Image (cartoon, rainbow, N blue to C red):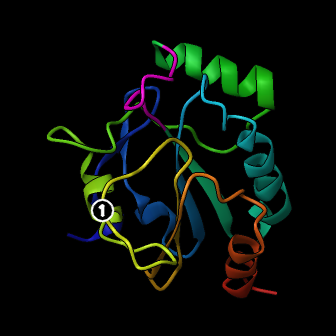
């Protein structure tokens, strides 16, 4: 399945795809407001502000898969905006593992991490960097958004 053609729901209920970001470097992250890793929102927003004008975007997908997300899209949106000043798109809540996982994550999880391991999303804030060539890089939850491997890959694939 073509990753960029998978339908995804926005918080307001409309449907879109990643095709609108075809020429961009995209960092897809499953997020959760009550997770101990939620402070990563600050670094995700810093990436957005640093590279957004050059063809980069963060796309956040709230998930209650690990029982740490707020109960409604409105609550998630308010949390992201008020607590972290998030300006990047935050989508409808999704499941990242299991029988009812979102098709986007079914495809993303085929990507191995640096250790060569693909499969289940292990926790909140797992990151998938989708390059304009459709190559995908995977970074596990404890890898901070400003990790040199992530920043280097972003910079290497953006116009000067």
User: Can you name the residue that lies furthest to the front here?
Assistant: 115
The structure residue drawn at horizontal position 75% and vertical position 61%, both measured from the top left corner, is 52
Question: Dividing the image into 4 quarters, which one contains the N terminus?
Answer: bottom left
The structure residue drawn at horizontal position 61% and vertical position 25%, both measured from the top left corner, is 33
Q: Is residue 98 above or below residue 73?
A: below
Q: Position of residue 8 (x, y in %)?
A: 35, 45
Q: Position of residue 79 (x, y in %)?
A: 68, 20
The structure residue drawn at horizontal position 52% and vertical position 53%, both measured from the top left corner, is 126
Q: Which secondary structure is most common in the magenta stretch? A: loop
Q: Position of residue 136 (x, y in %)?
A: 46, 75
120 within the magenta span? no
Q: Is residue 8 above or below residue 159?
A: above
Few, some or many C-alpha atoms within 10 Å of disc 1 (few <14, some 14-19, many ≥20)? Answer: some
- How many numbered marks, from 0 up? 1
Which residue is tagged 1?
A: 119
Q: Is residue 34 above or below residue 86?
A: above
Please give the range of residues in magenta: 62-70
The structure residue drawn at horizontal position 67% and vertical position 45%, both measured from the top left corner, is 88
Question: Dividing the image into 4 quarters, which one contains the C terminus?
Answer: bottom right
Q: Is residue 128 above or below residue 29?
A: below
The answer to whether 27 appears left or right of 64 in the picture is right
**Residue nearest the observer in this picture, 104 or 10:** 104
Question: Could you tell me which secondary element the residue under label 1 belongs to?
Answer: loop
Name which quarter of the figure residue 14 lies in. Answer: top left
């Amino acid at each position: 399945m073509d990753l960029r053609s998978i339908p995804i729901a926005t918080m307001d209920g409309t449907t879109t795809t990643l095709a609108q970001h075809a020429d961009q470097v995209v960092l897809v992250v499953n997020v959760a407001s009550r997770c101990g890793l939620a402070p990563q929102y600050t670094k995700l927003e810093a990436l957005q502000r640093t590279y957004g004008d050059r063809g980069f975007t963060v796309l956040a997908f709230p998930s209650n898969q690990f029982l740490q997300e707020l109960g409604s899209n409105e609550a998630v949106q308010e949390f992201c905006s008020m607590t972290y000043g998030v300006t990047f798109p935050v989508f409808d809540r999704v499941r990242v593992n299991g029988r009812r996982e979102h098709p986007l994550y079914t495809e993303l999880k085929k990507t191995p991490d640096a250790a060569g391991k693909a499969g289940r999303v292990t926790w909140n804030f797992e990151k998938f960097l989708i390059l304009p060539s459709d190559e995908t890089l995977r970074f596990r939850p404890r890898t901070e958004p400003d990790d040199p491997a992530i920043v280097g890959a972003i910079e290497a694939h953006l116009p000067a």
